[in-house]
Image (spheres, grey):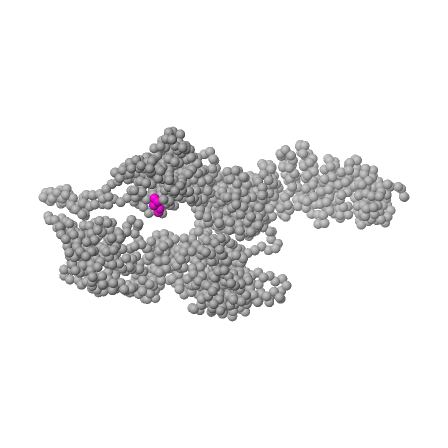
Amino acid sequence: MAETRSWLESRHLGRSTAGAEALELHRNLERKLAESLLAAGDELARSSVALAHRFFVGAVRLASERPEQYAWWEATVAEAGALEAGGRALVQALLELDPVALSRVPSGVADAWREALRRVGAQSTRLAAAYARALGSALTDPSPPPRDAETRLRAWAEAVLGVSSTPSWRAELLASHVADTGRDLFALFDAAAVSRWARLIALVGNVGRSPRLLSYPKECTSVPTALHGAILDCALVAAARQPAATDELVSRLGAAVVALPSRAAVSLLEAARAAAPSADLSGALLLVAAVAHEHDDSDLAYLCAAAVRVSARVPDALPAFLRSMDRSLETGGKDGFEAWLELGLELGTNNAAAARAHFRLETRTAHKLLTQHTAAVAFEEVEGLLQRYIRMLARRSLRLVSGPGIWLRPPITTTSEPLVRFPERVGLFATAEENQAFYVLSAAHAAGRFEYGTHAFSLDTYVSQGLPVNGLDLPRPGHTITDFLESFPNPLLAVGLFTLVDGLRIDARLTQEFPGLAVDIVKLGRAYVEQTTIHAGERLPEELIEALFLVSIGGHTPADLPERLAGQRGAVALVRDEMTRAASSVYDAAALTARLYWTLTLAFARAADGESDYEGAIEIGGATVIDPLEHLESGGSAPPLSSGERPETRGPDDPSPQSIRLAIDGADPDSEAGGIPLSPEELRDLIERGVKLGVSSGHADDAPALGLYITDLIGKLPSDVIADLAKAVSDGDPAAVRAWLSSQRSGRSFAYDEWDYRIEDYRRRWCRVTEEPIEGDGGAFFTETLERSREIVDAIKREFRMMRPEQFRKVRGMQHGDDFDLNALVDAQADRKGRKTPPDRLYVARRREERDVATLFLLDMSASTDEPLTAHADDAASSPRRVIDVTKETLVLMAAVLDEIGDAYAVYGFSGHGRRNVEMYPAKSFSETLGVDVKSRLGGIEPKRSTRMGAALRHAASKITKVSARARHLILLSDGFPQDYDYGDDRTSNVYGIRDTTVALRELELAGVRTFCVTVDPAGHDYLGEMCAEASYAVIEDIGDLPVALPRIYRTVTRL
Amino acid sequence: MKTKHSKRMDRAPFYLPIADEIDIFRAAYEQQLPVLLKGPTGCGKTRFIEHMTWLLVAPREDRPNPLITVACNEDLTASDLVGRYLIRGDETVWMDGPLTQAVRQGAICYLDEIVEARKDTMVLIHPLTDHRRILPVDKLGQIISAHPDFLLVVSYNPGYQSVLKDLKPSTRQRFVSLEFTYPPRDKEAEIIAHESGVDLTMAMELAHLAERVRELKSSGLEEGVSARLLVYAGRLIEKGLSARKACDATVVRGLSDDPQTQAAITEVVRAIFA
């Protein structure tokens, strides 16, 4: 029946492609169907022609393709329309869906969906619209719906309804949001997760002035289904306490879970749930995620199970634990880790701060525990030994440095300052002895290069001997062996070959001159080779290299190479014979290297012709991937590079390492910039584990995904230095970051432990002390003071002289001596006459009294010394005298007097700002005399900043204990108590500082140095009694007395 | 009293000349010029003077000890060297000190480590070491002229002293100086072999060890290995101890208490002795 339907004949419909197509299709429909369709369209057109059009287009398609499903669709739409009673939102939402796709959904699911729509729609058609839209599109996804789709659909409906019925003006908004999230999360969440999710949204959304709409972070999309619930559980617990941090926490949890194998992930979630949410925890999770790929699954499961124990007992310490757990396992092995864990748990029961520090690996005890339990040997443990060993074998002193990785033959280096690079840690063997022997052998090889001519190589000589130079990029600026090797087109290959070839020669000579080394060379070499996997493909070049490796380092003979390398036996035997000849020289090795190089290159070229997917990368010694700069160092700026970096052991399907964004903030540490401070070790770890680092610019209040802050990296640094680091990080240049870190470390700074009374342990390497120069005044102050105080000085000198004993004392009653003791003689005669046995102590001896005293004066140069003296009427002084001026004068007088009586003394000032910036100012060292320089420096002393006494005392200790004198003293001159902005947690309390100083003084006493504290602080009695050794302090009430008082104190203390 | 009198020497004390020290000493002796032996510990100074004494000064009835050695130290007084009155029973008796004995009898007086002695003691030797060759003895009121066969020899270890103790130039320049150092490896091996009885190969290895350890002199060790320690090691080895153990007991532990230095030397011992 050709009734006029304006909506059908509307131009809009006919003109559009879809519409025209639909009209066409409609004509071919079965009549009843077609009419039903039109009727439905009519109904819709009553409220909106556009809706009718849309319906028409979709419905016609459905009716054409799947007519049996059409009725269902029509009914659904009709129902929706009825529900809305005139509204359009729901219908509109429905019509946005693709009915054809929807029709493919299994009927049970589809029905469940419709049922859900009804339920939600009964409450609110707007919500139903959201539901329809989201869940409908989820269902129309090409991938098949999950098995429990119906349950899930119901759960989503429940969720929406649940949230919407909470008594809050945001309820509808949040419920709608819940529905929206269903679009992406339908496939991820099971029913339980859905309900938690909704609760979480409600919790987070209802806090704060404006509702925050939580979204599930994309990091979590690859989390296994079963674990979403657990993540959300965790998040719920956290959100109850700290809703604002929820998104970050969830995102981090997701990242961590994705990175971990499932058992570990489950444990981690359990642990996280028990701990309090905090920025620290989020940061720790991020780190866990970042480094997880480095460890194998069983280790991760083990560590996360331990984490559960930690968070059960000491939840506050969980973040600290998570950050250090993998390093602890690596350092200490299972045994060490267990011991460390147990101690930490124990500490946690009484002293949470101690447990935290322990788990952060900040305490001396933690460190000791781990290193004791492991057979692995760290470079710093053997550095002294290696230094001396090399001195003996190479007949020269070399600088020793360490880096990550493992190698037996040190990289060949020539820098302006010859240095030898060692692995940071050797844990290849089961006993510490063998690990140490590994280091020693490595040192012997490095020494051998000097003893047996490798470093005496001269490029000129090589060339003049007519040795092969084809293809080399000559001439070069330098003439050393490194220059030679760098002249090859592929220097890495050249260096690797040379190390193997010349290494044979060195080992042969070492064995000959040091027969005791022969055993180790073979044994350790073989073990090393066995432990490092070599991926030689079945290509000639790699086979040759592997064969060389096995023979040169592994101690194989050509004959006992494995069968698959049989073809290389001849070549390798030639090399070996050549290099083990008694007369072979480095030039022979160089020439042989060149020949091998070109043989290999040709072989590569031939192989490349034959293979389509040829890759030119080779590995020499498998685990020792040749990093472009590993074996070559040149120039003074020598950045330490990753030698022997572990290769990419991950396959293409492994999860890629995380990226972390660092906020490199060098701002004044005083400002509470927040965020998690990253220690240099942690940063280095991240680099070594291949984590991609990025830099974020911004401040603490920016978007939460800012990652970790390096506010506490290496103390206050000038901004250009910080900028260098930022650049290195953002360039994604691990080598540059390493170089930056190392340059920070190798500046002349000294690390000292600090005593933390709250944890009853030392914080290891907590303070960094540098020695700063004093800008002198040319000696003006010194001369002027002496002039002004001539009388006082003379008086003091007189006193000193008077009190000094005679150089020689007569001691009577000796059995041997120079002269007779007449009194004793007379008595003896009388005894004899009286028939008593006379004593034989009849002589007098002259005993020399020698004075062997050394004193270090440690001067507080803190800002408070800038205070002017109020109680002193200065005679027409232009600027008021300050505390520091008085102490300077005193020191000048002391120096003058001590110079005269010949006692050894030194003067150091100290100040600084923060634990990483303690500054010592040497005015006079023990070995200097009172010359122009010293006088100038004494005059140049000026007030600075803080007063971190403990660190200053420890550094001073290192100076005075080197002096050999019979009596050693340290006199501390101060004007107040120990104080620094981060001397302990509480800026208002002095207890930490006083306790640490007490311990530092005691350390000095134990080392045989008598200490004495002199203060001009009238309140000195309050704390000096506690801090100082018995009767070893003095409070000078009137600072004006100091110049006279100190010499007197000195006399008493040194018993003049 | 801290003097030492040499025992009678029946056969030549073994001494392997390194350079022309024997000729120089002989010439100095014949010219009555005092001699200063300079060098580190254990490189043969004492053995040398014993050898030279045996060569040049024969024992006689009035000269039973041709070589009179005094180990100098801080407590050594002038009376210790020159002599003092002692109470023997009822009498006061004058006892000649070692220096006076040598001066009277014409023996060689060897003051070992002279720098350790007190300054007032060192002043004593001034009149003996110039053309006067006299020894004033205040307590006796005598001035003794030295016997023509008398010679004063002193030794001195330049590297070892603390800053305060050093030979004054006015003292140093009275002597003919002979400088002793550690012998080269092969000569040292000969010495070790002779003194300890080990075979030359083992002696060479010990000498090699010494050479290496002496490199530490500037970084950790105050004093290099003395030949004496090596001879001890050799003798222990002769008695059946393993080379490593012998060196441990002598060289490693004898030279230093610093654990790192000991460890490093131990490694070198292990490297040299299989």
**Image: A497 above or below A191:** below
In the image shown, does B146 or A112 lie closer to the viewer? B146
| Relative side of A247 to A522, left or right | right
Q: Residue furthest right?
A: A1
In the image shown, does A1030 or A144 lie closer to the viewer? A1030
Q: Which residues are magenta?
A: A927-931
In the image shown, does A808 or A307 lie closer to the viewer? A808
Point out residue A540 in the picture as x, y percentages from the top left corner.
Answer: 56, 66
Name the quadrant containing residue A43.
top right
Point out residue A389 in the picture as x, y percentages from the top left corner.
Answer: 40, 57
Image point (46%, 47%), residue name: A367
Point out residue A331 in the picture as x, y percentages from the top left corner.
Answer: 48, 50
Point out residue A983 in the picture as x, y percentages from the top left corner.
Answer: 45, 38
Image point (66%, 32%), residue name: A168
Any part of residue A105 in sight? yes
Which quadrant is home to the N terminus of chain A? top right
| Relative side of A88 to A868, left or right | right
Image point (50%, 44%), residue name: A718
A929 falls in the magenta region: yes
Which quadrant is home to the C terminus of chain A? top left
| Relative side of A304 to A28, left or right | left
Q: Residue furthest left?
A: A833
In the image shown, does B248 or A349 lie closer to the viewer? B248
Please state the total of marks drawn on the protein image: 0
What is the chief secondary structure element of the magenta stretch?
A: loop
Any part of residue A264 in sight? no
A535 falls in the magenta region: no
Name the quadrant containing residue B251.
bottom left
Image point (58%, 41%), residue name: A698
